[in-house]
Image (cartoon, rainbow, N blue to C red):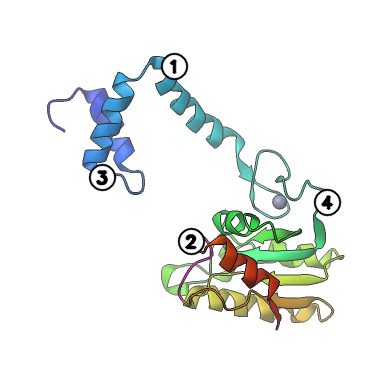
Amino acid sequence: MAGHTKSIERLQTELAKLPGIGARSAERLAFHLLKAGAEEALALADAIRDVKASVRPCSVCHNLAEGELCDICADDRRDKGVICVVEQPKDLLSLEATGEFHGVFHVLMGQIAPLEGSEPEDLTIDEMIARIRAGGVREIIMATNPTVAGDATALHIIDRMKEFPAVKITRLARGLPSGGSIEYSNVSILSDALKERREI
Ligand SMILES: [Zn+2]
């Protein structure tokens, strides 16, 4: 990177912090932005600024939202009695892509992994329990990832659910490869996993 101006170096340094972008790609992107018209380059800067200023967690389910509620919680046609519990907003998007699910979600914002410093209280489990206490929930679908940490997270939540014997707990069918992830599963596998979910 030597030889470039200070501000080009700064842009490259920032770009190289993005996942999957090495030093060479960062340099290529930086020069692309330098060549691009001011309008195009600044549109990217504006989009970044805008997303950081306006996107925040949904006050109900912790999905990404641009207001108090996310699009799903704000939709009257969604069945608020069925809550699908996922680890991350990306998992929610994958399940939404199936078009099979008409309930609502709860995003845990992580998984229980004590060795990595992630304890149950770091997740939104208390908020989920409060949601169920408020009433009207008939079913909880556990859709954590089929990994050791995902399973530990599901078991912890199932234990907390003893407080609500009337609420059915189901789990995505084991069509997902063990150790795989919801985020990278294809639509038909996820669709089957939802349709064939089993009661625990
Ligand atoms: Zn929401």
Q: Secondary structure at mark 1?
A: helix
Of labels 2 and 3, earlier in sequence is 3
In this view, the residue in front, 3 or 193, is 193
> Is the CB atom of the residue marked by disc 3 within 8 angstroms of ligand 1's nearest atom?
no
| Residue corresponding to mark 3 | 22
- Position above or below: 25 against 32: below
The answer to whether the residue labelled 3 contacts the one labelled 1, judged by CB atoms less than 8 Å apart, is: no
Q: Amino acid at mark 4?
A: Arg
* Residue 39, numbered circle: 1
Disc 1 versus disc 2: nearer the observer = 2
Q: Is residue 181 magenta?
A: yes
The alpha-carbon separation of the residues under discs 4 and 1 comes to: 40 Å
| Range shown magenta | 179-185
For mark 1, does the 10 Å Cα neighbourhood hold few (<14), some (14 to 19), or many (20 or more) residues?
Answer: few
| Residue corresponding to mark 2 | 184
In the rendered structure, the answer to whether residue 148 lies left or right of residue 15 reads right
For mark 2, does the 10 Å Cα neighbourhood hold few (<14), some (14 to 19), or many (20 or more) residues?
Answer: few
Of labels 3 and 1, earlier in sequence is 3
The alpha-carbon separation of the residues under discs 3 and 4 comes to: 44 Å
Q: Is residue 129 magenta?
A: no
Q: Secondary structure at mark 4?
A: loop
| Residue corresponding to mark 4 | 77
Q: Amino acid at mark 2?
A: Tyr
In this view, the residue in front, 121 or 113, is 113
The residue depicted at 83 percent of the width and 71 percent of the height is 138
- Position above or below: 171 against 77: below
Q: Position of residue 157 (x, y in %)?
A: 65, 75
Q: Amino acid at mark 3?
A: Gly
Q: Position of residue 42 (x, y in %)?
A: 43, 21
Q: Main secondary structure of the magenta part?
A: loop
Q: Secondary structure at mark 2?
A: loop
Q: Position of residue 13 (x, y in %)?
A: 27, 36
